[in-house]
Amino acid sequence: MQVTNRKRVMVTGGAGFLGSHLCERLLNDGCEVLCVDNFYSGTKDNVAHLMAHPHFELMRHDVIFPLYVEVDEIYNLACPASPVHYQRDPIQTTKTSVHGAENMLGLANRLKAKILQASTSEVYGDPEVHPQHEGYWGRVNPIGIRSCYDEGKRCAETLFFDYHRQHQVEIKVVRIFNTYGPRMHPNDGRVVSNFIVQALRGEDITIYGDGAQTRSFCYVDDLIEGFVRMMATGTEVTGPINIGNPDEFTIKQLAEAVLAIVGGNSKLVLKPLPQDDPKQRKPDIMLAQEVLSWQPSIKLNQGLIKTVDYFRTFLAL
Ligand code: NAD
Ligand code: UDP
Ligand code: UDP
């Protein structure tokens, strides 16, 4: 029996970069938060500041295995997100996406709970359609080194829609585009954290390829607002809905923006482009604007300044 009126919300992958910000936001909104994580790419440090909160609970658990708990809403974020992390154990990555989705959907079905899936722009692969809208089916290599992540996330989306059609589970699928901010892992190889850490240490800035490939970077607070709005929608809204910042930059422009903020003497050096690296990426966010009345408000430069501040302190510790 539930003895509290607080909404009980579970966040899988809650000790990761995005998950820790989401837990914090949900606690501020008055929810009871169950953070579930196996610490594959996240850390207890990311949620250390929440541990004393009376409505926060941290559980070590791998979502590949069944989980029996009682909650009202589920945010399924468990999955390593950076190529360095998801390629370290690619079989575990596919299992996390697929078995993890199956177990969390089984749980949502038993509880009649709403469930949000953190999907990804990677479902569009190396896209021929630009910007990417939700109706585009994508161009994904099924057997490459990114496939464990891309195909795992695609299969998870399939499971979400089949649980919705077959068992009427109330699903919410968001496709996240590159997001950055404080608590990104300093060694996970993602471009924003790499460039900032390199610049702060006075090391060379490593541009893969010629730096002409593009990405569109969303600041974490904007993204979390999109998540919460998506969860609050009625049953008719299932997604998929793109959440990201449509301001598009080349990787070279990003390097220059980071250097302008950090200063120092780092040089830009060119390194080989990884296999299947998408050439361009930019979300079409018309659906999010219409359905969620959501759009990002934080410009790249503003967000980079906050992220640089975080890493400056983090690296000094
Ligand atoms: P992250 O690696 O910081 O967080 C993922 C968390 O999931 C980590 O704490 C990790 O320990 C946990 N985890 C991994 N496997 C697990 C398992 N089997 N059981 C339980 N926990 C497990 O990455 P993030 O950037 O915070 O990404 C969160 C989610 O958002 C991921 O699902 C990712 O695919 C998605 N996403 C992120 C981005 C981005 O730009 N950050 C873009 C697209 C999609
Ligand atoms: N599951 C879970 N927690 C629950 C309910 C189900 O982890 O509260 C798991 C269950 O172990 C199963 C998966 O979710 O592996 C899918 O459950 P479902 O009921 O859809 O399928 P079935 O149990 O019939 O395989
Ligand atoms: N990248 C880069 N230097 C780095 C890390 C990444 O030039 O030190 C490039 C990478 O090749 C890709 C882009 O930056 O074109 C974004 O990479 P990230 O791994 O952050 O995200 P994703 O490729 O998954 O969008």
Image (tube, rainbow, N blue to C red):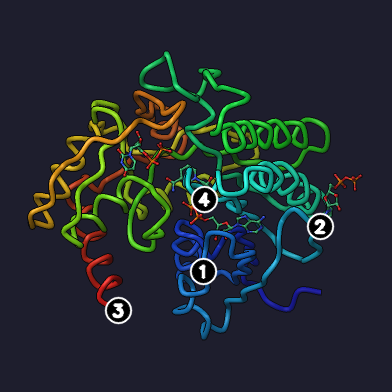
- Vertical position of residue 269 compared to residue 33: above or below: above
Q: Which amino acid type is shown beneath numbered disc 4?
A: His
Location of mark 3 (residue) = 317
Q: Is mark 1 within 8 Å of ligand 1?
A: yes
Q: Which residue is mark 1?
A: 43
**Counting residues from the N terminus, which is met first, the one under dot 4 or under dot 3?**
4
Spatial CA distance of label 4 from label 3 is 23 Å
The correct choice, above or below, for 149 with respect to 78 in the image is above
Q: Who comes first in sequence, dot 1 or dot 4?
A: 1
Comes first in the chain, label 2 or label 4: 2
Tell me how far mark 2 sits from mark 4, CA to CA: 23 Å
Asked if ligand 1 lies within 8 A of label 3, the reply is: no
Judged left or right of residue 276, residue 37 is right
Q: Amino acid at mark 3?
A: Leu
Between disc 1 and disc 4, the foreground one is 4
Q: Outermost residue toward the top?
A: 128
What crowding class fits label 2: few (fewer than 14 Cα within 10 Å), some (14-19), or many (20 or more)? some
- The verdict on label 2 being within 8 Å of ligand 2 is yes
Disc 2 marks a residue whose amino acid type is: Pro
**Residue occupying image coordinates x 51% and y 18%:** 136
Identify the residue at image location x=58%, y=38%: 149
Instruction: Give the position of the C terminus as an image quadrant.
Output: bottom left
Q: Are marks 4 and 3 in contact (CB under 8 Å)?
A: no
Residue 170: image quadrant is top right
Q: CA distance from mark 1 to mark 2?
A: 22 Å
Which callout, 2 or 3, points to the residue nearer the camera?
3
Quick one: SS at disc 1? loop
